Image (cartoon, rainbow, N blue to C red):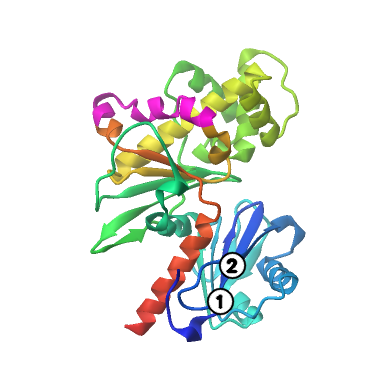
């Protein structure tokens, strides 16, 4: 349940990715998220039109305060999405919607803010390890792109990180991965982590596997590759999924080492939660711990997959709580 002055309600919260925009309302102090709905971004020219459709279809009251996470850097007033065509001014959007307050955050910054509110039922641990209180926490997740963030302790609370870690250069851990990256490098000017660890990246990784193996590749979507891999009906798709999970383990371990994330590493996004038991059996955790002299250090860090249905919305709501608390001081 969320807090703040009644003058800041109703509140609208959102989570806007490269494919879908999710919205919910908070009617008043002490109340939970309601009226959750997902809209395809491609159906609208911008966020204002998507929000107006959401409000109209649900016969919802005009919000006074709003916050949403968006899959993009947020630096200044103007936002242009990396993996979608939306571009807008935050101030102009606030005025167009008649809001008293609008807060736009990077989507994984918003998701990081939700982490302290998640319950054990929202998480599935992969591998061993135990979190250490008041230590840094890592967060990453693959969807339309690759989001990376985290939380750093500050007093009695945490400060969320905002960055673009998904665009770091992808590293190989063995000769086969080096071959895959070399093939990808002939197609793309920069083989970033996101180039492989995302929906489009899964397709690129499948094509790379076929090319390196010297076998024909079917024209498959990311969802089809996942489906065939999970069902075991295509050995190439199974290998692609296993390599995807291994690369994710490498990037997750790099994040844990950079942050000193003894508080644990959380995995969100749209892809990994759908892999379910396959992910738990995949090379992810072994690769996460495979850092030579720091194997023991990483073995003590827990990794969790987030299964909460709307964690980004919870993070946006918590951002508004913080803003309201700052005004009250």
The residue carrying mark 2 is 34
Residue 66 in percent (x, y) is at 55, 73
Residue 77 in percent (x, y) is at 53, 71
Please tell me which residue lies in front, 199 or 194. 199
Label 2 crowd (10 A; few <14 / some 14-19 / many >=20): few
- Is 284 magenta? The answer is yes
Tell me the magenta residue range.
Answer: 277-296
Let me know if residue 74 appears in the view. no
Residue 258 in percent (x, y) is at 31, 42
Q: Residue at x 72, y 21 (%)?
A: 217
Is 239 drawn above or below residue 77 in the view shown?
Answer: above
Is 244 left, or right, of 155 in this rendering? right
**C-alpha span from label 1 to label 2:** 8 Å
The residue carrying mark 1 is 27
Label 1, secondary structure: give it.
loop
Label 1 crowd (10 A; few <14 / some 14-19 / many >=20): many
């Amino acid at each position: 349940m969320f807090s703040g002055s009644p003058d800041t309600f109703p509140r609208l919260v959102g989570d806007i990715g490269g494919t879908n925009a999710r919205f919910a309302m908070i009617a008043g102090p002490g109340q939970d998220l309601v009226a959750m709905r997902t809209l395809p971004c491609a159906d609208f020219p911008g966020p204002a039109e998507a929000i107006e459709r959401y409000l109209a279809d649900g016969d919802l009251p005009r919000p006074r305060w709003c916050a949403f996470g968006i899959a993009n850097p947020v630096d200044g007033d103007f936002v242009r999405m990396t993996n979608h065509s939306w571009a807008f001014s935050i101030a102009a959007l606030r005025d167009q919607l008649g809001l008293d307050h609008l807060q736009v955050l990077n989507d994984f910054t918003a998701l990081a803010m939700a982490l302290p509110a998640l319950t054990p039922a929202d998480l599935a641990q992969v591998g061993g390890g135990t979190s250490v209180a008041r230590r840094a926490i890592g967060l990453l997740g693959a969807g339309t792109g690759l989001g990376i963030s985290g939380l750093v302790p500050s007093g009695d609370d945490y400060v969320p990180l905002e960055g673009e870690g998904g665009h770091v250069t992808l590293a190989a851990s063995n000769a086969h991965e080096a071959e895959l990256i070399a093939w990808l490098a002939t197609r793309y000017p920069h083989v970033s982590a996101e180039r492989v660890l995302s929906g489009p990246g899964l397709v690129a990784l499948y094509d790379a596997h076929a090319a390196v193996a010297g076998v024909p590749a079917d024209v498959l979507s990311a969802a089809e590759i996942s489906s065939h891999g999970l069902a075991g009906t295509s050995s190439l798709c199974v290998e692609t999924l296993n390599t995807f999970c291994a690369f994710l383990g490498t990037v997750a371990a790099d994040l844990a080492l950079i942050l000193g994330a003894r508080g644990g590493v959380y995995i969100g996004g749209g892809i990994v939660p759908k892999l379910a038991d396959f992910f738990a059996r995949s090379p992810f955790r072994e690769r996460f711990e495979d850092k030579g002299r720091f194997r023991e250090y990483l073995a003590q860090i827990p990794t969790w997959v987030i299964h909460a249905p709307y964690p980004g919305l919870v993070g946006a709501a918590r951002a508004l709580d913080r803003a309201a608390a700052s005004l009250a001081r």
